[in-house]
Image (cartoon, rainbow, N blue to C red):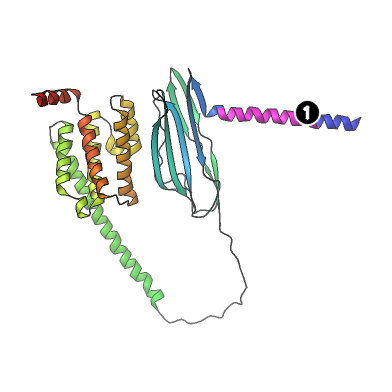
């Protein structure tokens, strides 16, 4: 009789555990997936793998599916994901799923040089949709970073103290310090020169009383005539090109484009509602490729350099005020 009671007791406890597990899974899924009047909004993040060796690379993906009318955006990470996890590169993409939904994805290439278990905290976004205020959370992740195994073939005796004459090993650090100082000084000089050029571009826009699109087109023509990329100054070419576009966006749409990331600028353009989605997609690709040149030392092909200028020029011309476009159309007809 006692055996039968313990047998039934174990089966009841297993049943209760399965039911609790089922509802916990449902609760986790509902925390990052919401439905509003038939429109689904979901938010998730995931790692390629949870176990790596020190210095190995993997991808961390953040995916948001949202109605086009929803005013929210995924947080953008720059140099580090956490104190222990570094970002080597990033790729952003926005895809239209249907007439009402879009899919925004952030793909980060990450690594870590600190062994241990590192937590990637849950990411939260606040949304206000159809009069409903709510929050979505991506699941937190754990990244296990292990040290490569070492193998000791043989233990040797402790050697006696040896006198070693002064050689290059002792002189080399001083040479490196001096060389490093010269390199650092060169970098500081280059930064000062770059900052002064950037200020000159901004001053040109500030002093002129012409409309933003007139100034932008004029500066684009000057940049084209300077033939920077043809002379090998690729990074300076893309820096000046993106500065012209960012300052134009500030003057035309009243945003703080010079202080925003590329993805934040594109999100502002999506919320504007007056700009064609294809044009925003071209702008996103242009800004991403420019970031890769400026920060990842990418080397684009000659036709890609020309297409970057054409994309910037088309964006300015196609987003001019409507009254200017109408006047130009009438002038062309005459």
Quadrant of the snapshot with the C terminus: top left
Q: Residue sitting at 43 percent across and 36 percent down?
A: 105
| Left or right relative to 22: residue 227 | left
Image coords of residue 255 (percent x, y):
27, 31
Compared with residue 250, is residue 228 higher up or lower down, i.e. above or below?
A: below
In magenta, the rendered stretch is: 10-29
Residue reaching furthest right?
1
Corner quadrant of residue 68: top left
* Residue with the mark numbered 1: 12
User: Which quadrant, please, contains the N terminus?
Assistant: top right
Instruction: Please give the name of the residue rendered at 10% of the width and 24% of the height, measured from the top-left corner.
Output: 333
- Indicate the secondary structure of the residue bearing disc 1: helix
Crowd tier of the residue under label 1, counting other residues whose Cα lies within 10 Å: few below 14, some 14–19, many 20 or above: few
The rendered magenta stretch, by its main secondary structure, is classed as helix
Q: Is residue 260 left or right of residue 85?
A: left
**Snapshot quadrant of residue 18:** top right
Residue 283 in percent (x, y) is at 29, 36
Q: Is residue 109 left or right of residue 181?
A: right
Res 261 seen here: no
User: Does residue 216 appear in the picture of this structure?
Assistant: yes
Residue that appears at 13% across and 35% down = 208
The picture quadrant where one finds residue 219 is: top left
Instruction: Give the number of callouts.
Output: 1
Q: Where residue 59 appears, x then y in whole percent? A: 47, 45
**Viewed as shown, does residue 249 lie left or right of 129?**
left
Q: Residue at x 16, y 36 (%)?
A: 217
Q: Residue 166: x percent and y percent?
A: 41, 80
Residue 43 is one of the magenta-drawn residues: no
Say above or below: 178 vs 203: below
**Residue 16 highlighted magenta (yes or no):** yes
What is the residue that sits farthest to the front in this orientation? 333
């Amino acid at each position: 009789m006692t055996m039968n009671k313990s047998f039934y007791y174990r089966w009841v406890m297993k049943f209760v555990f399965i039911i609790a597990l089922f509802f916990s899974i449902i609760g986790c899924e509902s925390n990052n997936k919401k439905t509003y009047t038939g429109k689904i909004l979901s938010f998730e993040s995931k790692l390629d793998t949870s176990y790596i060796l020190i210095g190995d690379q993997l991808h961390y993906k953040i995916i948001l599916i949202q109605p086009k009318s929803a005013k929210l955006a995924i947080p953008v990470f720059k140099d580090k994901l956490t104190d222990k996890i570094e970002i080597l590169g990033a790729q952003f993409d926005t895809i239209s799923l249907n007439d009402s939904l879009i899919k925004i994805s952030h793909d980060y290439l990450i690594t870590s040089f600190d062994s241990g278990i590192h937590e990637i905290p849950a990411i939260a976004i606040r949304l206000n949709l159809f009069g409903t205020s709510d929050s979505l959370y991506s699941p937190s992740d754990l990244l296990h970073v292990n040290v490569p195994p070492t193998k000791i073939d043989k233990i040797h005796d402790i050697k006696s103290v040896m006198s070693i004459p002064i050689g290059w090993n002792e002189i080399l650090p001083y040479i490196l310090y001096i060389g490093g100082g010269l390199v650092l000084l060169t970098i500081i000089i280059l930064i000062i020169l770059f900052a002064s050029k950037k200020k000159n571009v901004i001053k040109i826009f500030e002093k002129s009383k012409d409309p933003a699109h007139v100034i932008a087109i004029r500066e684009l023509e000057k940049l084209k005539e300077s033939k920077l990329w043809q002379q090998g100054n690729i990074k300076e070419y893309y820096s000046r090109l993106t500065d012209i576009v960012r300052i134009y966006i500030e003057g035309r749409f009243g945003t703080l484009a010079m202080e925003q990331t590329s993805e934040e600028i594109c999100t502002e353009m999506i919320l504007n509602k007056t700009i064609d989605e294809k044009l925003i997609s071209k702008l996103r690709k242009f800004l991403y490729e420019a970031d890769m040149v400026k920060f990842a030392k990418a080397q684009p092909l000659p036709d890609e350099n020309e297409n970057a200028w054409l994309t910037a020029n088309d964006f300015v011309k196609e987003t001019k005020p409507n009254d200017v476009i109408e006047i130009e159309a009438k002038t062309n007809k005459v």
